[in-house]
Image: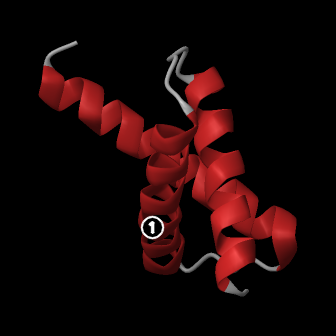
Amino acid sequence: MGIIGFLIVGLLAGFIAEKVMDRNHGLIKNLIVGVIGAYVGGFMAQALGLAFFGFFGHLIVATVGAIVVLWLFALLAGR
């Protein structure tokens, strides 16, 4: 996946995670959370031995990672 595709997946994953976790942030924070979530989700999937392919596979993994990132951020912030 190219850099543009990676950014699109990150933005969508951040947006979906924002809605799932009932948060309200802007476009840039969604992009940042989604990109970090893509790395976290990819690491988790690889550690669990899960394979993911295509746009929707990457989107699901990135979204799960972004939800974990938002959950950890809320946990550390004491929310």
Whole-percent x, y for residue 71 in the image: 36, 32
- Side of 35 relative to 3 (left or right): left
| Circle 1: residue type | Met
In the rendered image of this protein, does residue 49 appear above or below residue 55? below
Quarter of the figure that contains the C terminus: top left
In the rendered image of this protein, does residue 40 appear above or below residue 50? above
Which residue is rendered at x = 42% and y = 63% of the image? 40
Quarter of the figure that contains the N terminus: bottom right
Which residue is rendered at x = 47% and y = 56% of the image? 37
- Secondary structure of the residue carrying tag 1 is helix
Which class describes the residues within 10 Å of circle 1: few (<14), some (14-19), or many (20+)?
some
Which residue is rendered at x = 58% and y = 43% of the image? 14
* Residue that carries the numbered disc 1 in the rendered image: 44
Whole-percent x, y for residue 34 in the image: 54, 52
Q: Toward the viewer: 52 or 12?
A: 12
Which residue is rendered at x = 49% and y = 24% of the image? 25
In the rendered image of this protein, does residue 21 appear above or below residue 37? above
